[in-house]
Amino acid sequence: MTLNEYNFAGKKAIVRVDFNTPLDENGHITDDTRIRGALPTLKKILNDGGAIILMSHMGKPKGKVTAKYSLSQIVDAVSEALGVKVQFVNDCMKAQAEAAALKAGEVLMLENLRFYPEEEGKPVGIEKEDPSYEEAKKAMKASQKEFAKTLASYADCYVNDAFGTAHRKHASTAVIADYFDADNKMLGLLMEKEVEAVNNVLNNIRRPFTAIMGGSKVSTKIGIIENLMNKVDNLILCGGMTYTFMKAQGGEIGSSICEDDKLELAREIIAEAKAKGVNLVLACDSVIADNFSNDAKTDIAPSNAIPTGWQGMDAGPESRKAFAEAIRDAKTILWNGPAGVFEFDNFAAGSKAVAEAIAEATTNGAYSLIGGGDSVACVNKFGMADKVSYISTGGGALLEAIEGKILPGIAAIKGE
């Protein structure tokens, strides 16, 4: 069942959203992207004549009631965005009366699900090494089912529109689906778009396919790199991981970031790319600095010949040209992770060059998917959010999907 096929008239829908929005020290929202992203789903339900019970997490309260993570702080913002006054209940396990009283067109928001450890389903206060851990884990799983059953009891149908948590087998993202039949559980419109975006870059590939993987560590991207190696024509590896690859090939990297325990892995990736005919593009030159600061003294150096006391901070001018060349002619593009320390304006040119090349390729008909917090922040910083095909709301969920993993939040609804 898809959301657009379902008629919510007279129904109460419990909707898992990702309202884990960033707040300032006064509890004011600094970026409402996640709230805006859920609006199409919520408005469809209300326009049909349904009622909504919203549930979400915020932060990592680790099973304890924590004022700074209370969803009460965002109720007014959600009300304003929806155009409907949102009711609030301050305990997600004690909302039976409020849910029962809910009328068509009304919206109720539950307090932070993670105030209960049952949401994440992890034993609290016991380390994995503890002999009693397995017993505690089993007990927690049973409690998690009861927790999900209570949430399910509030509604007639279940909608999951929280792609950002789809890779977690939590009570509200996966377990709750067991309490609804196939005709009364569905993905939200945002989730459908995310699934389609991943499918476009992994299964509906138009060639050439260029993937750009940035960030500081090759270890966090190895699963993705290995999956993409069988799909891409061009693979750009940039950011801090550049220097692990340079050192692996005998280069001098000064005091640049490096994973010394991953040098052999880097050599294996280089060999695999060669064997599979993948054009592996690494930063041949770097903008280097004498300390980790926007105001540091800078220079340009070959990425494999960085002087002692200096560190690579961004892709150099020749690297930017090479990156752009591998991106411009592509018809499918995936970008995850910056090309340098883009948070510092003096070291943002590499990431900006990547963003500009993606925007140009998209204008020329390429499908471009941007995902991961830093890449999204890059695109927003350079004012190019409207110049790419799709920006994913999911960090870890997107990465696991690209690795080829089945996401529990999706599998629970699709029966995979």
Image (cartoon, helix red, strand yellow):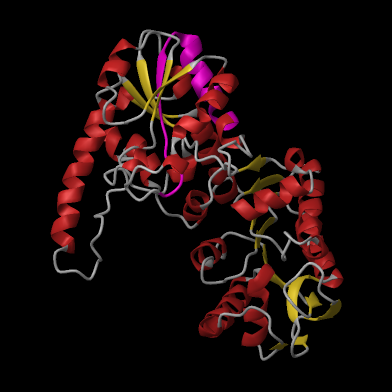
Residue 172 shown in magenta: no
Can residue 260 be seen? yes
| Vertical comparison of 358 with 72: above or below | below
Q: Residue at x 23, y 29 (%)?
A: 150
Provide residue 272's location: percent of width, then percent of height: 57, 76
- In the rendered image, the quadrant that contains the C terminus is top left
Count of numbered marks: 0
- In the rendered image, the quadrant that contains the N terminus is top left
Q: Residue at x 48, y 37 (%)?
A: 18
| Vertical comparison of 405 with 57: above or below | below
Bounds of the magenta span?
A: 36-60
Q: Residue at x 74, y 60 (%)?
A: 342
In this image, 338 relative to 188: left or right?
right
In this image, 227 relative to 157: left or right?
right
Provide residue 293's location: percent of width, then percent of height: 75, 70
In this image, 386 relative to 404: left or right?
right
Q: Image quadrant of residue 324?
A: bottom right
Q: Residue at x 30, y 33 (%)?
A: 177
